[in-house]
Image (cartoon, coloured by chain):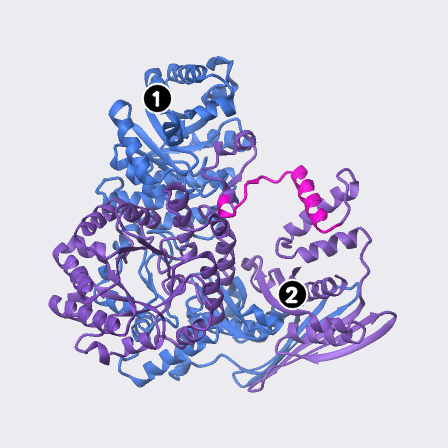
Chain colours: A purple, B blue
Amino acid sequence: MLDSTLRDGEQGEGISFTVQDKLKITRLLDSLGIHYIEGGWPGSNPKTDEYFKLAKKEKLKHAKLVAFSSTCRAGRAAKDDSHLQNLLAAGTPAVTVFGKTWDLHVSAALKISLADNLKIIDDTIRFLKQHKKEVLFDAEHFFDAYQSNPEYALSVLLTAQDAGADRLVLCDTNGGTLPDKVQAIVSHVRAGIKTPLGIHTHNDAETAVASTLAAVAAGATQVQGTLNGYGERCGNANLCAIIPSLQLKMNYKILPPQKLAGLTALARRVAEIANLPPPSQAAYVGHSAFAHKAGVHVSAIQKNSATYEHVNPGLVGNKQRVLISELSGVSNLLYKAKTMRIDLAKDDPQTRQLVQKIKTLESAGYHFEEGEASLELLLQRTLGKHKPLFELISFHVTNEKFAEKELNVEATVKIKVRGKEIHTVADGNGPVSALGRALRKALTADYPRIKNIALSDYKVRVLDGRHGTEAKVRVIIESRDDCRTWGTVGVSTDVIEASWLALVDSIEYGLLK
Amino acid sequence: MLDSTLRDGEQGEGISFTVQDKLKITRLLDSLGIHYIEGGWPGSNPKTDEYFKLAKKEKLKHAKLVAFSSTCRAGRAAKDDSHLQNLLAAGTPAVTVFGKTWDLHVSAALKISLADNLKIIDDTIRFLKQHKKEVLFDAEHFFDAYQSNPEYALSVLLTAQDAGADRLVLCDTNGGTLPDKVQAIVSHVRAGIKTPLGIHTHNDAETAVASTLAAVAAGATQVQGTLNGYGERCGNANLCAIIPSLQLKMNYKILPPQKLAGLTALARRVAEIANLPPPSQAAYVGHSAFAHKAGVHVSAIQKNSATYEHVNPGLVGNKQRVLISELSGVSNLLYKAKTMRIDLAKDDPQTRQLVQKIKTLESAGYHFEEGEASLELLLQRTLGKHKPLFELISFHVTNEKFAEKELNVEATVKIKVRGKEIHTVADGNGPVSALGRALRKALTADYPRIKNIALSDYKVRVLDGRHGTEAKVRVIIESRDDCRTWGTVGVSTDVIEASWLALVDSIEYGLLK
């Protein structure tokens, strides 16, 4: 299994990872048990080089890092090619090189002879093998190539095999080959080639997953894809759909069951890193994947869940969901309150009021799933069990910009703590950072433990962008101290006020616990 | 071809059509050339009944309306069943009835004997045929049924055939059957059944499209699906992917070429009616479906677009696009500059500098893919071809909050326009809205056309949340006037400054064009 989220995935429209994002995803892929992680094309931009420098230092348990490049350029020896120098400089145990396989490409894009293209491939792979690399050879456009000129396509594979490639990856680069053709072609190739085969497909006909499964059935032993199917154009084959089908429907042992049960969480975490909405309709891992409407389906699944579920959702870490009625709202809340050690009785009118309040806030944009600490504070406030740390008198934030000068940002906070009025001011690199600093300054003397609380994530989501800058925003803050992490949420049309609400909850929760 | 967007599609999470929406979609489906439109389950809610009442009056050129229901209920004669009365009352030329086919369902959900289920099916279909309806029989869960008890599954089909059903539709209701099994089972059925077959699949393993194509290859002659794959859980088989593959890759004549060329517009129009974002990564019809980002790809498609495009995008009414990002090279920029009518020569040192500048900005957090207008302004500014509309002297934004009172937000802007100094102030429901209003106020006298520019989307992304509120943010603004839409981008640690940058670009682009 090779994951290309960091290479082919990043070629998807709207996707741009920071180096830190790439490292986070690397750790997640490794902990899932992915065998190869294709990290990028070294030398193509500074971010990729920085990534490989840092990724090498990660202690990966399962995965090998793979750097990606083209074969060496025409008219140049492999040893003198800067692409390949960069590839070696990445210092990964394995490398992928892609080579032209389709006669059209050799003549129309490279503009060299078919024989010269074979020489380039041979030279490139031999050079990399001399440097003791595990070499994966991507036969680009293999399926178009095979349909256009099968002898030449096979001669490319044989050349790569003879040069010592460890694996030949058949790529459906344009993503247009339908699964039955993929299966037939892989079978033919399998018969004439000894080197293990890989399959790499794209989703341009919405059949990438099916083509990958068909290729495995025909003898490919490595699947390549990306998380959530991210990738250029219509995306790559989606590993989040391929892995469960291989394991649960085709009986391949790919991951230990407890790892497979982490797949849903992983898919959503990566969507969050990519700052894309989690794929709600996605097979297996989508929020809606096991969501049933009231009526015929719900009554049937309560008798036997196999009646409308193709697999047990727990196997991939997903959950059955049923349309929320007020009753299920109450049981949800009781369940949550119990985990927070808050007493709530089912028949208490306060409980029903709380459910109503939560529904109102959620429909106004709150999202307590990611802001459970705010939910806990809301319950305690409503039940009169919360003692606020301070009382706000006022805050004031100014942003000043003079042409050609740096922005000047300043915030003041006036609060009452234990009867005393405290007034502080701070600057910052933005309005929310200045406000946060002023608040911390005001609380430090009375609550020195505030120093242990750090913000570990800050997210802003515009809730209805159609209203432009008048739209409501939701701020989610993740905080941590020495032993815990907690999430808080604030909503307002004003990003500063929304951040203030989430900040206050973050600090109150951290200091009160 | 049967479209079930209005029936199964509406069961998708987050989808709810008004009667007018349903009528609009009906007209669009008819004009595309769809043969059957499944409109809903009469009697299940007032909206559906109203729909059929109005839809009957539409002058449809191609499509037959189809009403949907279950077989009659156990222990009741078909003629006395209210479901079937409602079905007839809808007054459509064709009807779909679904019947249990899986022995598990008959015993676990219906709790009747296998023989009684056959009687129900027989009675229902004979009754509907007496009323001169064209009857489509949906064999629910057919593939699970066949794997559990093939004799019984076939006896259900034979019962429906003998009762006079016009078509037997094999449904993969749980969506978990992989395409090779679908193909094998359809082939077996085809051999023993004379009635024409249909195929209806769901996307729970991300293989619905492939399963549908496999069933057609095995002899099914009607495909069922929904537009954009809308539907319960992971959705239904996506007609927007199935139709082009059948026609362009499997040589079925389904639609006249000029109708097929309307598919992309239709898919986006329906997404708009459903109030969902248009499916950008969708096969064939997605905004990204023919969007090229990697430098290698762009240089090749300029020589021959077949090198990285599986079909000509024009055949489905889509377009080739080139994206600019840190992954791109000189060829992407040249392509873009050309579409912007900006002269750039490949060998000009300025061109290389621009590529470098773009890469630096992208690695600092800019994302020009979504901010193409900012890119165009950047090129013009760098090439000295840009005349700014105004000169900033200063801006000033304050956010003031007193306990128990509403937040007070105010922004002032001082700019020089055509030599005059203009100083304005505005309030707003947040700092960015106040700033935007003050800027518009300052520009209105000199540029009255600013009134035509509206913001249609506003997005904020925190780029590295680990730095908490100190993190950099990227703001993307989408704007529109009477005839166009354009995107601009700004990056800063200060959300107000980032928004300012994107706002200024939005207005400059809108007014200069």
Helix, strand or loop at label 1? It is helix
Mark 2 Cα-neighbour bin, 10 Å: few <14, some 14–19, many ≥20: many
The amino acid on which the numbered mark 2 sits, given as a three-letter code, is Ser
Give residue A139's position: percent from left, percent from top.
Answer: 23, 61
Q: Is residue A118 left or right of residue B25?
A: left
| The C terminus of chain A: image quadrant | bottom right
Based on the picture, tell me whether residue A325 belongs to the magenta stretch.
yes
Q: Are marks 1 and 2 on the same chain?
A: no
Mark 1 Cα-neighbour bin, 10 Å: few <14, some 14–19, many ≥20: few
Give residue A261's position: percent from left, percent from top.
Answer: 50, 49
Q: Residue at x 42, y 74 (%)?
A: A47
Kindly identify which residue carries mark 1: B151
| The N terminus of chain A: image quadrant | bottom left
The amino acid on which the numbered mark 1 sits, given as a three-letter code, is Glu
Give residue A22's position: percent from left, percent from top.
Answer: 46, 67
Residue closest to the eye, A417 or A216: A216
Based on the picture, tell me whether residue A14 belongs to the magenta stretch.
no
Q: Is residue A413 left or right of residue A407?
A: right
Helix, strand or loop at label 2? It is strand
Q: Residue at x 39, y 45 (%)?
A: A245
Task: Report if residue B429 is visible in the image.
Answer: no
In which image quadrant can residue B443 be found? bottom right
**Disc 1/disc 2 C-alpha distance (Å):** 60 Å
Q: Residue at x 36, y 44 (%)?
A: B207
Extent of the magenta region: A315-341
